[in-house]
Each structure stands twice: as structure tokens, then as C-alpha cells.
Image (cartoon, grey):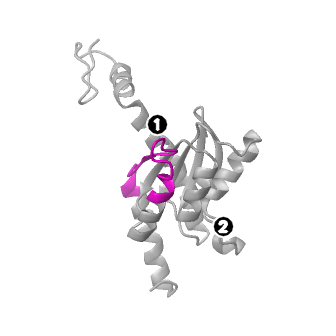
Amino acid sequence: MTCNKRNGTRSESEDSSLNITLLCALLFYGDDMKDEEYMQLALKEAKKAYQKDEVPVGAIVVLDDKIIGKGYNQKERKDDVTSHAELIAIRNASKKIHDWRLNEATLYITLSPCAMCASAIVQSRIKRVVVGALNPDLKNKEIVDLIFAINKEKPTVQITEKVLEKESLELLQSFFKKQRKKGKVK
């Protein structure tokens, strides 16, 4: 079997099974496919927030291909400014493994983090962050980029952006459109 890296197809007879094509895709797009699968789960968390009238941001923490923490925004419900999806997912992950150090873990979040969450990500030693939609606030992005780049010789956090960006943005836009109709947002 020969796999074509560009499109994940095989160059075998037409009667080859679909499994060969899937295997090719996994070989060449494995991390991207995993990122999308995990981001789908983060979107599920975001939808929980949406249903509870919270800004629909969801997060999951993955370590060794296992979900060890989940969270969605709960600021309004808990009257707690620190109840961001990322912080809840990090707390849950730390409890699950009985360690605040989340070395080698990946955090999947549907919206790029704020400065508070970025600091918690660095402090918890999360290795990688996968982001759905980018926060349109450029000042926030500058601050977050500075936080993530504190140690320029040895960056602490790897960032992958725009994974299922469209789905993340649509959920956020739908939420704010609904809020504007209710008169809650200008």
C-alpha cells in the first residue's frame, strides 16, 4: 500500500477497503484528527454553557489520550469571576491526577484564553494549548502572547490555533445574537 500524503488516499486497486484510506489519513493527519475530535468534546462543554445562558466557552484537558478534566463557563451561575472554562477544566484535571502539575497535558479550548487563564495555563505547566476561535480583542492577544512567551529561550506552552474555528465562532455569535435580542448585550 502507498499513501498519498497530500490527500490521504492509497494507490491500490479500487476494491481496497475504506479502512486503508482511513489508515492513510491517520498516518498523515493523526494529530489534526485527534485535535478535531477533542475540540468537538470541548464544543460539547461550550454548548452546556450556552444552555445555561453563560458565554459558550468549553475546555477539556487531555493527558496520554485520556480526558482528565472538563469545564465550561459558569461565571454568571456561580457569581465568580474565576469560573472560566479553562480554570474549571484545570482544577478538575489536577484533582483527577492529584497533582497541580499538568506536565505533558494538552488543553483544548473553544476561545483563546484571557490573561488570567493564560497565567493559570503556564502555572499548571500545561504543555500544549489547542484553540478554536481567536478572541477578537487584540490587547488581550498581546497580553496572552507575552504571558506564554515569558521564557523565550524555552517556550513553556505550544499553541495550535483555529481548530474547528467556524463551529466555535458560530456558537459564540449565536449566543451574543440571542443576548442582544434579550437586551442583555449592546
Q: Residues within 10 Å of mark 2 (few under 14, many from 20)?
A: some
Whole-angstrom CA distance, mark 2 to mark 1, is 29 Å
Residue 41's place in the image compared with 173, above or below, is above
* Amino acid at dot 1: Lys
* Amino acid at dot 2: Thr
Residue 119 lies left or right of residue 10; in this view the side is right
Residue 42, image x, y percentages: 54, 51
Q: Residue furthest front?
A: 153
Check if residue 173 falls in the magenta segment.
no
Please tell me which residue lies in front, 115 or 82.
115
Give the position of the N terminus as an image quadrant: top left
Give the position of the C terminus as an image quadrant: bottom left
The quadrant holding residue 169 is bottom left
Please tell me which residue lies in front, 138 or 6.
138
Mark 2 secondary-structure assignment = loop
Residue 95, image x, y percentages: 75, 46
The quadrant holding residue 24 is top left
Which residue corresponds to mark 1? 34
Which residue corresponds to mark 2? 82
Residue 115, image x, y percentages: 54, 64
Write the residue at 44% across / 43% down: 36
Write the residue at 64% across / 48% down: 124
Residue 111's place in the image compared with 21, above or below, is below
Q: Residues within 10 Å of mark 1 (few under 14, many from 20)?
A: few
Residue 82 lies left or right of residue 142; in this view the side is right
User: Label 1 near label 2: C-beta < 8 Å?
Assistant: no
Check if residue 164 falls in the magenta segment.
yes
What segment carries the magenta color?
A: 145-167
